[in-house]
Amino acid sequence: MRGTGLKVCIIGAGTGGLCLAQGLKQDRIEVEVYERDHSPSDRLQGYRLSISATGRRALQACLPEALFEKLIANCANPSESVAFLDHHLNRLLVIDLPHGDRKDADSELPVSRRALRQILVEGLDGVIRYGKKFVSFEDAPRGAVMVRFEDGSSTTGDVLIGADGAGSHLRAELLPQARRVKTGIVAISGKLGLSDAVRGATPELILRGPTLILGPRGCFMFASTVDYEDAEFGEEQFYDREKYVMWGFSAHDTTLNLPADLDALSGRDAIVAVIRLMDDWHPSLRRLVQTADVSTVTAFAVRTSVPIRPWATRNVTLLGDALHNMTPFRGIGANTALRDAAALRGALVAGARGRADLIQALAAYERDMVKYGFAAVQTSLKDMERFHADGLLARTATKSFFRAIDRVPPLKAAFLRR
């Protein structure tokens, strides 16, 4: 039932789109989500997302209380530290994290993509339409917008939202001038199950939390562990409690020297390419790469969005990676999308209930979203450039920077908040 007279159509059942749909449902605003995949599990990998305090607040605001509690129950153990090391495992900077209880309002929520998707779709039966690939939109009578899909079907709503990720087709139609560009960095990632043998062979700091490793020749490695407390399966419903160590190795494309078609690269060949650049690395790090489950190894060219000038607001807008797609080197993409979802929910509610003109409310959302969203893009890009600097002076300066912070506790706290 349309409790407010406003109908919202969302393209994309990703993290941001589903969070928004949950919030709008609570507000009794009619919402429909159109997803090109044919089921919630299509194309999902098992790597975790680290939901920060920002993302946590957005989820708590948009989800029913029981569903948010289920999310907390399905999260992995919070990280105990964040560490920066060199490729010989020498310490550069280690920051102990204060929030070890998932129920702490400021604690991170490490959750697998599978589990998060399963939780976010709960209660949205009849809201999500699967197998619907967006093709185009056009103006419809009485200020509405018509949406067309590849299967020949269409729908009409009052507001259309593109939450269809970095390759957004809706963005391409709404803002053809918005660009994503290659950064010149290629990333390869893999994981291995957290058996007792793997736990014993993995460096302690990686078991404690995210570990960032600066290597020679502009090479960079990230490693982290996903672990869960042992729990009895009673009435509580759990999703995807896989325990593993994951790693990501990245370098300039000219350094990795991989074929142009990364999708055709086998997991074994990707591992060989990484190991070829790790001759002088600590044996424990080499072992993580060499013993990865080949079926989990993927490679991709790192891209980033380019800041865009303001545009004329209308009843079609965007959230998350559909506009401000960023590199993975700050780990804030999903949290920024969740922030978008909570902010856009507020704008839509204000317009639906007559507290503000709808277009003006959407314009205010877009101004703020563009400002903080592209600030996050630039922050992520700067970290990428810092981690992959291949000049000796730049590399030495980065290591000295981390060591200086490591010696001053107040600087550690400030660095963590940046």
Image: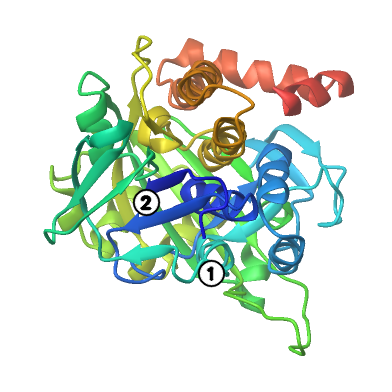
Q: Is residue 395 above or below residue 331?
A: above
For the residue labelled by badge 2, is the local secondary structure a helix, a strand or a loop?
loop
For the point 46% across and 42% down, which residue is it? 280
For the point 70% across and 53% down, which residue is it? 109
Q: Which residue is mark 1?
A: 118
For the point 85% across and 53% down, which residue is it? 100
Position of residue 209 in the picture relative to residue 159 (left or right): right
Disc marking residue 224: none
**Badges 1 and 2: C-beta atoms under 8 Å apart?**
no
Q: Nearer the viewer, residue 338 or 106?
A: 338
User: How many C-alpha atoms fall within 10 Å of the one at disc 2: few (<14), some, or many (≥20)?
Assistant: many
Position of residue 331 in the picture relative to residue 65 (left or right): left
Looking at the rendered image, the disc whose residue lies closer to the viewer, 1 or 2, is 2
Q: Nearer the viewer, residue 399 or 129?
A: 129
The quadrant in which residue 410 appears is top right
Position of residue 414 in the picture relative to residue 259 (left or right): right
The type of residue carrying mark 2 is Gly
Q: Which residue is mark 2?
A: 12
> For the residues marked 1 and 2, what is the alpha-carbon distance in whole angstroms?
15 Å
Residue 98 locus on image (x, y percent): 87, 43
For the residue labelled by badge 1, is the local secondary structure a helix, a strand or a loop?
helix
Q: Is residue 239 above or below residue 276?
A: below
Residue 3 locus on image (x, y percent): 57, 52
Of the numbered discs 1 and 2, the one sitting upstream in the chain is 2
Q: Nearer the viewer, residue 351 or 196?
A: 351
The quadrant in which residue 162 appears is top left
Asked whether residue 344 is in view, the answer is: yes
For the point 59% across and 66% down, which residue is it? 119
User: How many C-alpha atoms fall within 10 Å of the one at disc 1: few (<14), some, or many (≥20)?
Assistant: some
Asked whether residue 75 is in view, the answer is: no
Q: Assign the C terminus to one quadrant of the image.
A: top right
